[in-house]
Image (spheres, coloured by chain):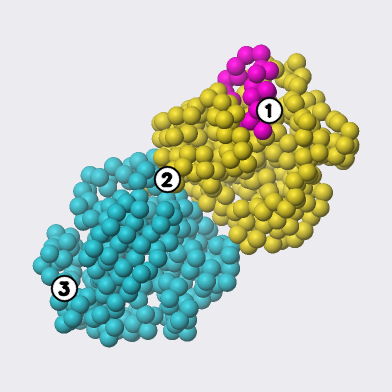
Chain colours: A yellow, B cyan
Amino acid sequence: MSLLAVGSVAFDDLETPAGVREHLLGGSASYFSLSASRFNPVQVVAVVGEDFGAAEEAVFAGRPIDLSGLVRQSGLSFHWKGCYGQDMNEAKTLETHLNVFADFHPDLPQAFRKAPYLFLGNIDPRLQREVLDQMEARPRWVALDTMNFWIEGSLKPLLDVLKDVDILLINETESRLLTGERNLVKAGERIRILGPRIVVIKRGEHGALLLTEEGAYACPAMPLREVIDPTGAGDTFAGGFLGHLAAKGDLEFNTLKQAMVMGTLMASFTVGQFGVEGLQFLQDGQMAERLQSFSSMIHVDGL
Amino acid sequence: MSLLAVGSVAFDDLETPAGVREHLLGGSASYFSLSASRFNPVQVVAVVGEDFGAAEEAVFAGRPIDLSGLVRQSGLSFHWKGCYGQDMNEAKTLETHLNVFADFHPDLPQAFRKAPYLFLGNIDPRLQREVLDQMEARPRWVALDTMNFWIEGSLKPLLDVLKDVDILLINETESRLLTGERNLVKAGERIRILGPRIVVIKRGEHGALLLTEEGAYACPAMPLREVIDPTGAGDTFAGGFLGHLAAKGDLEFNTLKQAMVMGTLMASFTVGQFGVEGLQFLQDGQMAERLQSFSSMIHVDGL
């Protein structure tokens, strides 16, 4: 049962306290699909330019990632340049070149329009709406990610699409911007009024918070000795979270909690290396081992 | 088996987004003992002025809190005035009047000098050393809390006393100040070299991190819909944490994890009301209920 994801495929230039890298494969759809595909087949809808070639395609090879929705256009792919200070919680954007992304309007392949699970990655909410409208039937669930840029500049179309969303993934600062509430439990309540009945607030190195009508779950981040590059951590979290939900096929509260752990697990690999390397070269054994160690960490005996 | 605590008893004037309060009973030893005494008997060493009367004493009544180490001096008690903005993670100090605390030198009652468990609350590290030196035998464990003021102004005496400490409780910012390390796992490693083999880094609304040679445990804060006054949350956490350890009598890793939960539990009551009210009027049933709900929150089935 495929998980359809729409988002960006990009090239990133990055500077973090750990070093400088240029022309790294990035973008929300890249991180998301590499993460989610460890749990469930993923169909990707995105646009790339002529600079996306065999080397980039190879990154996705050998995983259940269907790239037939990847539109190739003349010109260059989306390009982002950013840097991080010692506090790696927030990126500073230095340059954004939309390139082929500027005039992108998703046109879903016929086979994608029946997907039971849909992730609307962080793009213009008008495009998120276009994708939703192309689905033949309402998916079993729709998840959405967004950012300050759209909250500040495209609030109306964002609120419009949110009405039809089940799961919102959003970071802490953005949740406050969207709701005007500093308290995250109250921010979650306000968001639930806007549409999504399941809210996941991503807090970077402080973990993530799940807020539903049934209750809250605060999932700590994995304590890491080394953070190399936080780019894509949120999309990777979304991939682990939604990949697990798609694989399980239900939205029970405990399944959501498991999914929070899977998102946390996957994000811990992304931040450990530059770009998508932490996901690209991840062995199943490493995943199992770290899951075991995280599960054992969060479990407290005899309470 | 008593837990001996040295610290401050104070009167606080507070302004938080929830309101303004004057002349509230506060101080590290007050919060600590009201919290720890829910788990284990506590002996308090501190100094108060003439403004500490029957009403204040009554706050501690009916709990296993031995106030025979409370020195009464002429003059006024320690007085702190502070405020919090919307971001309640950091207090802004407006006024500090040491008053009777200025010339305080602890002189432990004979009966206190045999205590098997010792908490050196956040006071001048030279006084912390004086207390330690008055113990008849080395306690089974010694825990210490400190703050930026001592790290910046009294580093040498602080490092001197840390050599003889088993457990350091410190907040996130202060752990970075003490070690020069932004990464908390590495900060914990550096602190372990200074003496304490068990490090607890308090992160306010983001929870707390336990770092030992055996491993790390990230404990989330309880998601709360309302935070009224964060004053004393750290001392309350220390009380729940160390009170549980004293009651259990061992420092096994799982006992330390349980203690992290107890610290988190107690702190959630403190921040829910002004001053010590959240602890003072806390019913056993409320404690049990919230512990149950927190335990159930952090537990994830079927991982």
Is A178 placed above or below B47 here?
above
Direction from residue A301 to residue B102 in the image, left or right: left
Please report the bounds of the magenta region as a residue range.
Answer: A124-144
Amino acid type of the residue that numbered disc 2 sits on in the rendered structure: Asn
Q: Is residue A11 magenta?
A: no
Front-lying residue, A296 or B260: B260
Q: In which quadrant of the rendered view does residue A10 lie?
A: top right
Is A227 placed above or below B115 here?
above
Marks 2/1: CA distance?
A: 30 Å
Amino acid type of the residue that numbered disc 1 sits on in the rendered structure: Leu
**Residue B206 at x, y = what percent?**
46, 53
Task: Locate the N terminus of chain A and report the quarter of the image it occupies.
Answer: top right
Amino acid type of the residue that numbered disc 3 sits on in the rendered structure: Asp
Residue located 79% across and 48% down the image? A24
Marks 1/3: CA distance?
A: 66 Å
Q: Are marks 2 and 1 in contact (CB under 8 Å)?
A: no
Front-lying residue, B191 or B278: B278
Chain letter behind tag 3: B
Determine which residue is flagged by label 2: A183
Determine which residue is flagged by label 1: A127
**Residue A299 at x, y = what percent?**
46, 46
Is B267 placed above or below B106 here?
above
- In the rendered structure, find residue B12 and report the number of the disc placed on it: none
Residue located 58% across and 38% down the image? A151
Q: Kindly state the secondary structure of the residue where label 3 is placed.
A: loop
Q: Share a chain, discs 1 and 3?
A: no
Chain letter behind tag 1: A
Q: Kindly state the secondary structure of the residue where label 1 is placed.
A: helix
